[in-house]
Image: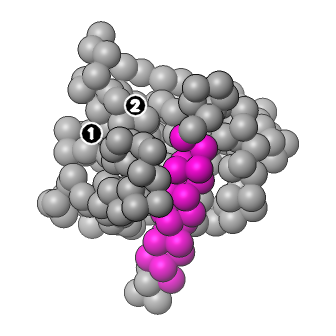
Amino acid sequence: MKTEMIIAGAGGQGVLEVGNYICYLGLLSGRHVAYTPSYGPESRGGKVKCYVVISEDEIASPIAEEPDYLVVMNIPSMDYLAKLKRGGTLLMNSSLIPDEPARGDVSVVKIPATEIAIQLWDSNQDIPDTRIAANMVMLGAFLAISGHDEDMALLKDVMAHFLTDRKAKYVKLNLEAARHGYEYGKGVGLELATI
């Protein structure tokens, strides 16, 4: 089975980081992966996206032409909604995207990722601004919605691989954010299943 996705947002929101994490989870699970980042010249604030393709078989193209999933972190990145295939799933950061999407042929999952990340400050006061973990909330929600429950157990290995040295202080926050996103996504997934 092959899964294609686009993850989009603004520079500084951790969009490319989430794409890397999802691909590494795929590798740890013995699947083939392709990761293609795309970003403008700005270091922060410009539009950023990445294509992620995960498959049991070899991957012919690293570009998600008609993605199964679209993860969107901010309003400008809703432009990619047109690429989402009919019957696909949109996961949107409803903390920053208040409007309803203009398509009725896709499943829409609203995750208040930034709000959830802000609430994590009480248990992570050594991190000045926990909003940086909104991307991990979205990652956890994606794993829940897409049925990749087994990958939640592998997140510790992913964090150990990517967050070393001075970045190691973010491991606890990232794992906690992903767990909260996963739990939120499981609840939303149950609602989608009953509609």
In the picture, residue 158 is in which quadrant?
top right
Q: Amino acid at mark 2?
A: Lys
In the picture, residue 164 is in which quadrant?
top right
Taking the image as shown, residue 7 lies to the left or right of residue 139, namely left
Residue position for label 2: 49
Nearer-the-camera pick, 84 or 78? 78
Nearer-the-camera pick, 6 or 178? 178
Q: Is residue 180 magenta?
A: yes
Mark closer to the chain start, 1 or 2: 2
Residue 15 tag number: none
Residue 3 appears at what percent x and percent y?
Answer: 61, 48
Q: Amino acid at mark 1?
A: Ser
Mark 1 element type = helix
Mark 2 element type = strand
Q: Residues within 10 Å of mark 1 (few under 14, many from 20)?
A: many
At x 30% / y 10%, what residue is drawn?
41
Q: The C terminus is located in which quarter?
A: bottom left
Residue 153 appears at what percent x and percent y?
Answer: 74, 58
Q: Is residue 85 magenta?
A: no
Image height of 182 relative to 155, above or below:
below
At x 40% / y 61%, what residue is drawn?
122
Residue 187 appears at what percent x and percent y?
Answer: 48, 79
Residue position for label 1: 77
At x 24% / y 26%, what residue is drawn?
45
Q: Which range of residues does the magenta coloring cover? A: 170-190
Q: CA distance from mark 1 to mark 2?
A: 8 Å
Taking the image as shown, residue 23 lies to the left or right of residue 48, namely right
Nearer-the-camera pick, 86 or 179? 179
